[in-house]
Image (cartoon, rainbow, N blue to C red):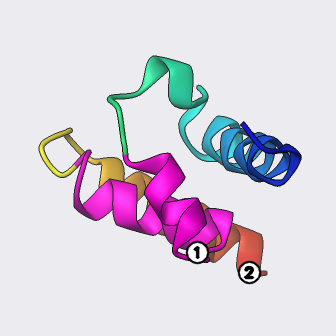
Amino acid sequence: MTDGFILWMRSVNAQCNRAFGMDTDFLPDANWRPYFDDGLTPKDAIDEAVMDAWDDMLDMQEIWEDHCAREAV
């Protein structure tokens, strides 16, 4: 892994911890490396994961949207 990807994943995990109370190790797998390679920000990558990888998980989208609204204030 590149240092840039490692730092990027730390940001993803920090945001997941704040939003969901757990990091990506405890959530279903998502396509993190392709999201990074495509230039997505950690927030945008989590948006994609919520819609693609976690779409069948109860309330994930609502939890993420509530978190984003709180962070924007």
First in sequence: mark 1 vs mark 2: 1
Vertical arrangement, residue 66 with respect to residue 11, above or below? below
Q: Kindly identify which numbered label has been placed on residue 56.
A: none
Which residue is at the front of the view, 14 or 18?
Answer: 14
Side of 50 where 3 appears, left or right: right
Q: Looking at the picture, which amino acid does disc 1 mark?
A: Leu
Quarter of the picture containing the C terminus is bottom right
What is the x, y in percent for residue 11?
A: 78, 50
Residue 39: image quadrant is: bottom right
- Residue 27: x and y in percent read 41, 27
Residue positioned 33% across, 48% down in the render: 60
In magenta, the rendered stretch is 31-54
Q: Is residue 46 magenta?
A: yes
Badge 2 amino acid: Ala
Where residue 1 sits in the image (x, y, percent)? Answer: 71, 36
Structural distance between the alpha carbons of marks 1 and 2: 19 Å
Residue 7 in the image: x percent, y percent? Answer: 85, 47
The residue that appears at 35% across and 32% down in the rendered structure is: 29
Determine which of the numbered discs, if any, sits on residue 40 in the image.
1
Label placed on residue 72: 2
